[in-house]
């Protein structure tokens, strides 16, 4: 059985959607990090870099260039941070504390990704002071 075959889609009842239209994807804890990792590299990182760049009044081209320059470093850092954390969170953290642990990890991750997105500005600022 392939990894994709092991992901189970289960219908749930929804008061808003017609019967059979709403599904929950049940992924085991061991598979969750793989789904998150694919999501991170293909969706989260590009959206983060492009939206932050545009909100800072950077051009779309400049935002794309920053994304291309920093994507690999950010993806490797994301994988190095989240995969061990998720494995430890599911293995050692009691269910009642997993959300708090995830919130704490998200706080640290937000600092890390913000630093990665603005490393060039830090280097430019340091050169201007010299």
Image (cartoon, grey):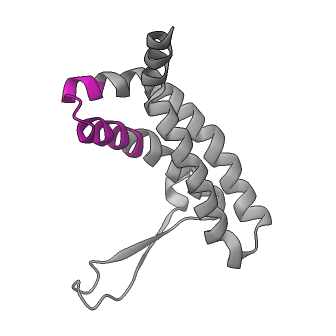
Magenta-drawn segment? 44-64
Q: Position of residue 28 (x, y in %)?
A: 61, 65
| Nearer the observer, 76 or 21 | 76
Q: Residue furthest top?
A: 130
| Nearer the observer, 14 or 48 | 48
Give the total number of marks visible in the rendering: 0
Q: Position of residue 4 (x, y in %)?
A: 49, 54
Residue 123 in sight in this render: yes
Q: At 51% across and 62% down in the image, what residue appears?
A: 7
Q: At 62% across and 55% down in the image, what residue appears?
A: 105
| Nearer the observer, 1 or 83 | 83
Q: At 62% across and 48% down in the image, what residue appears?
A: 82
For residue 63: magenta? yes
Up/down of 126 relative to 112, above or below: above
Residue 1 in sight in this render: no
| In the displayed structure image, the side of residue 3 where residue 21 appears, left or right | left
Up/down of 62 relative to 6, above or below: above
Q: Residue furthest right?
A: 92
Q: Quadrant of the N terminus?
A: bottom right
| Nearer the observer, 121 or 40 | 121
| In the displayed structure image, the side of residue 119 where residue 19 appears, left or right | left
For residue 128: magenta? no
| In the displayed structure image, the side of residue 90 where residue 32 appears, left or right | left
Up/down of 9 relative to 114, above or below: below
Q: Position of residue 48 (x, y in %)?
A: 36, 42
Q: Position of residue 119 (x, y in %)?
A: 48, 25
User: How would you classify the magenta stretch by its main secondary structure?
Assistant: helix
Q: Residue furthest front?
A: 129
Q: At 22% across and 34% down in the image, what residue appears?
A: 57
Up/down of 17 relative to 98, above or below: below
């Amino acid at each position: 059985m392939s990894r994709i075959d092991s992901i189970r889609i289960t219908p749930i009842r929804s008061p808003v959607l017609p019967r059979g239209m709403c599904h929950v994807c049940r992924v085991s804890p061991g598979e969750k990090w793989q789904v998150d990792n694919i999501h991170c590299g293909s969706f989260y990182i590009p959206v983060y870099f492009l939206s932050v760049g545009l909100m800072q009044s950077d051009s779309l081209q400049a935002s794309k260039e920053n994304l291309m320059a920093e994507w690999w470093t950010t993806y490797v850092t994301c994988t190095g941070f989240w995969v061990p954390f998720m494995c430890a969170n599911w293995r050692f953290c009691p269910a009642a504390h997993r959300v708090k642990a995830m919130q704490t990890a998200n706080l640290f991750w937000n600092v890390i990704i913000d630093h990665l997105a603005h490393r060039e500005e830090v280097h430019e600022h340091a050169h201007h002071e010299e």
